[in-house]
Image (tube, rainbow, N blue to C red):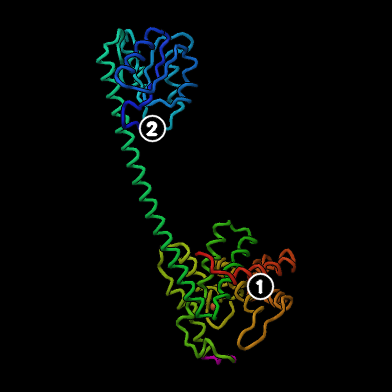
Amino acid sequence: MKYLCEDLSHCRILIVDDEPANTQLLERVLAEVGFQHYRSTNDSRRAAAIFEEFGPDLVLLDLSMPYLDGYAVMKQFVDQLAPDMYLPILVLTADISPEAKQRALSLGALDFLTKPFDITEVVLRIRNLLETRNLHKQLHDQNHRLEERVRQRTNDLEEAQAEILERLALASEYRDDDTGAHTRRVGSLSERVALALGLPAEEARVIGLAARFHDIGKIGIPDSILHKPGPLTAGERSLMRTHTTLGANILAGSRFLILRVAETIALTHHHRFDGHGPAPSLAGEDIPIEGRIVAVADAFDAMVHDRPYRKALSLTEAMEELRREAGKQFDPRVVEAFLAPGPGDLLHMANAVNDEAKMTPERV
Ligand SMILES: [Fe+2]
């Protein structure tokens, strides 16, 4: 790992000083005490390029130099560093005023060595700064590992949530038909219609996922009614209608957006746009858009597939039925989005949704 040089002798040290005697002396000292990786330059204009290529753990930097002084070089180094990177810069100076010292400190210098050098002091300062850099690096790595663990836990929770929703959707789907294909198709159709209506992609995605729970309330409807091969009696129809409130009750009060949207859909997907119907309900645009979308997707999918009590309508017949009911049972804007721009596209969409439904259920 380039940033960490646990064995200090492996640390990389860059010396920038216009005076060759100084760089030679420092190189000799470094070699004598066992450092193996050091580079030096007497031309401050080359410092930034060497810095980038060499990647030092510590810089020994003269302040007073021709062309680029130490402050300018320091700024170049700091600009190259990642914000959380700790690079010790040890300033070499013959004499330093409090103002110059302050300026160097503010630019990132960590310590000062006064010329002429006291060799013991030079070595001690270098070692101290490298130790500090290693400690900083260890702390940085530890924080990084902790962040990674938190991220992993969050991912696990999100995956658990997604899986639970997936299984809840499956439970709802298998109650409705043997394959669960209807609710998956309604989900896909609803997402596509939401997109065709111009809703943002993320909103359409949530509607598509939530739409799969639209009939979850059927869990509470007796088999004798749910799977009755013939038409329902008035009493049975009335009981069947309670699947909307049952579903909404099952989903109510969630803090998760998908389940909140699913609750709305479960409650409103049988509301008629014209407000007519056996029970008082919302009408027109007071019905949430997700409910109006699923009403059309659900009805269309039911029409074009065989049901126990009737054969499937053709695509053309189903489209005619949707048009007939626009403004009555369905929101005309949703019907328009559903049918536009042409039968070819609707056919393509219905086929695509059919193909999708045959595959493994998508993740919620
Ligand atoms: Fe329903």
Residue 107 seen in the figure: no
Image quadrant of ligand 1 equals bottom right
Of discs 2 and 1, which sits in the foreground?
2
Pointer 2 local density, CA inside 10 Å: few below 14, some 14–19, many at least 20: some
Q: Secondary structure at mark 2?
A: loop
The answer to if 327 sits in the magenta stretch is: no
Tell me where residue 228 appears, x and y as whole percent. 55, 90
Q: Is residue 235 above or below residue 268?
A: below
Q: Is residue 234 magenta?
A: yes
For mark 1, give the secondary structure: loop
Image quarter of residue 31: top left
**Residue where numbered disc 2 is placed:** 3
Which residue: 45% across, 78% down?
246
What x and y, as percent, mark residue 285?
A: 58, 67
Main SS, magenta region, reads loop
Write down the region rendered in magenta: 230-235
Quarter in which the N terminus is drawn: top left
Give the residue drawn at x 27%, y 20%: 125
Which amino acid type is shown beneath numbered disc 1? Gly
Density class for disc 1 (Cα within 10 Å; few <14, some 14-19, many ≥20) is some
Please give the residue where the numbered disc 1 appears in the rendered image.
327
